[in-house]
Image (cartoon, rainbow, N blue to C red):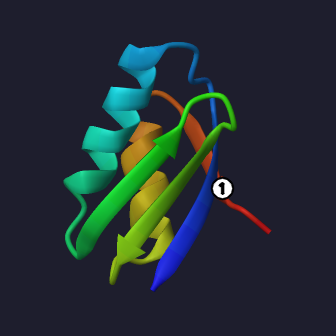
Amino acid sequence: MTIELTVSGMTCGHCEKAVQGALKNVAGVQDVRVDLKGGTATVQGDAGPQALIAAVTQEGYSAQVRA
């Protein structure tokens, strides 16, 4: 399953790495690609969207499932 998130608040490479690390630590996540310029994160795996959003929020960013 692939879930695309829109992530707000990322401004630099450190932000990008923080979001990527937070998402990779969610149970069931197999792969993560974060696009700083596009403000998106693409997650492969079995993790639910709420768990992914919670992980990003804990890092200090906001996220929502991309429509």
Residue under numbered circle 1 = 64
Which residue appears at 60% of the width and 57% of the height? Answer: 5
Q: Quadrant of residue 30?
A: bottom left
Quadrant for the C terminus in the image = bottom right
Which residue appears at 60% of the width and 64% of the height? Answer: 4
Q: Position of residue 54 (x, y in %)?
A: 43, 53
Are there few (<14), some (14-19), or many (20+) residues within 10 Å of tag 1?
some
Position of residue 39 in the picture relative to residue 24 (left or right) = right
Identify which amino acid the numbered label 1 is placed on. Gln
Q: Position of residue 20 (x, y in %)?
A: 34, 42
Q: How many discs appear? A: 1
Q: In the picture shown, does residue 18 fall above or below 52?
A: above
Position of residue 26 in the picture relative to residue 33 (left or right) = left
Decide if residue 11 is in sight here.
Answer: yes
Q: Position of residue 51 (x, y in %)?
A: 39, 65
Q: Position of residue 60 (x, y in %)?
A: 46, 27
Which residue appears at 33% of the width and 84% of the height? Answer: 46
Q: In the picture shown, does residue 53 fall above or below 58?
A: below
Secondary structure at numbered mark 1 = strand
Quadrant for the N terminus in the image = bottom left
Decide if residue 59 is in sight here.
Answer: no
* 22 and 1: which is toward the camera: 1
Which residue appears at 56% of the width and 23% of the height? Answer: 10
Q: In the picture shown, does residue 49 fall above or below 38?
A: below
